[in-house]
Image (cartoon, rainbow, N blue to C red):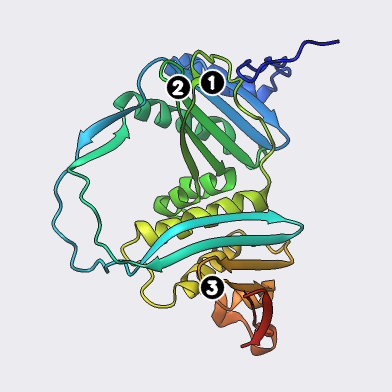
Amino acid sequence: MLPLQGCNSKKIALPRPTPTELQKKFEVKCRKDYNLNVITRIVGKTFWIYAPTDKPLFDFAAETPTPPDPLKKPAKYDLLYIKGGFKNNVFDFQYDVIPKIKGDLSNEGIRNEGTDYFNKIYNNLFTAITETMLDPQTPISFVVMAITDIKKGLEARYTFYLEDYRMASVEGIPYDEFTKRVLQESKGSTQYIGDEIGQHLEYNDIKMPDFLAKQIVNRIRFKFTQSDFPPQQGYERAILSIIANTLHYYHFKDFKEVRTDDIRTKKKMIFTPKELAYFGENKGKVSPQEKGKLIHIIFENGKTTLKDQ
């Protein structure tokens, strides 16, 4: 009988699969040109990069005062919660939005930013990707890049669609648009401390619908909290527009429905792909015959109400 592992036991590192020629090329490039000892792994069509370091990645800096922008519209809503996912060919988004009742709180002139060393690693990794992976024949769809401070247990993780980066590299899309398509996460855990080989990472093959669901959540959060043009009236339409546009950017049609759930108002809506297209930038190309019927499904007080529009 095998002994049980305690809750605090570290995961046993599995043997690393034999590196492919692409992995070897990328790792040698990082080691020789940038003195970076990275570890890579390919799962399906996802290329994982683990860059451990014992130097600080983040620091505090003074915020430069900026005068109010007269063109920037004040936010009228606060986004308290947003969650999205994809299951059984259905995109599902839940959100909680309230009217904004307080002005933005002062940050006391302090911001958290990446250190010069972090920026150097970040730029060098992208340069190595540029020089080794941008060939259209490269059998990679997604890249996950984890830069980890194994001394303090902090990690910055970036997930992106390689074709997006190819497009940005040749100015097929603006670089600002590319940054909106990158999934960025900053995390901290004692499990990261001393992890020189990336055994805390759960390597998996990124799937397009899951990637799109997370990107849509990020775009909605950005629209409400950082955009110069936050929703002014009818925030539902702004949310639906983001969903429709994001799926259109990727020409993604392999889904049956999009469902939204406004937690506060208890209003739930369901859209087919054709109905959803009416809310996006491409709506002018949708014929009346394709618009279909928009049905609001409202659950309230234990009862279901259908409302055609």
Q: Amino acid at mark 1?
A: Gln
Disc 2/disc 1 C-alpha distance (Å): 7 Å
Q: Secondary structure at mark 2?
A: loop
Disc 3/disc 2 C-alpha distance (Å): 41 Å
Sequence order check, earlier mark of 1 and 3: 1
Instruction: Assess disc 2: are there few (<14), some (14-19) or many (≥20) residues with their C-alpha within 10 Å of its C-alpha.
Output: some
What residue is pinned by disc 2?
A: 153
Task: Give the percent coordinates (x, y) of residue 72.
Answer: 25, 66
189, above or below 160, in the image: above
193, above or below 177, in the image: above
What residue is pinned by disc 1?
A: 191
Task: State if disc 3 and disc 1 touch (CB < 8 Å).
Answer: no
Closer to us: 54 or 134 = 54
- Is residue 135 in view? no
Residue at 58%, 37% in the rendered image: 143
Closest to the camera, between mark 3 and mark 2, is: 2
Task: Give the percent coordinates (x, y) of residue 131.
Answer: 52, 31
Q: Amino acid at mark 2?
A: Gly
Q: Secondary structure at mark 1?
A: helix
Which numbered dot is residue 280? 3
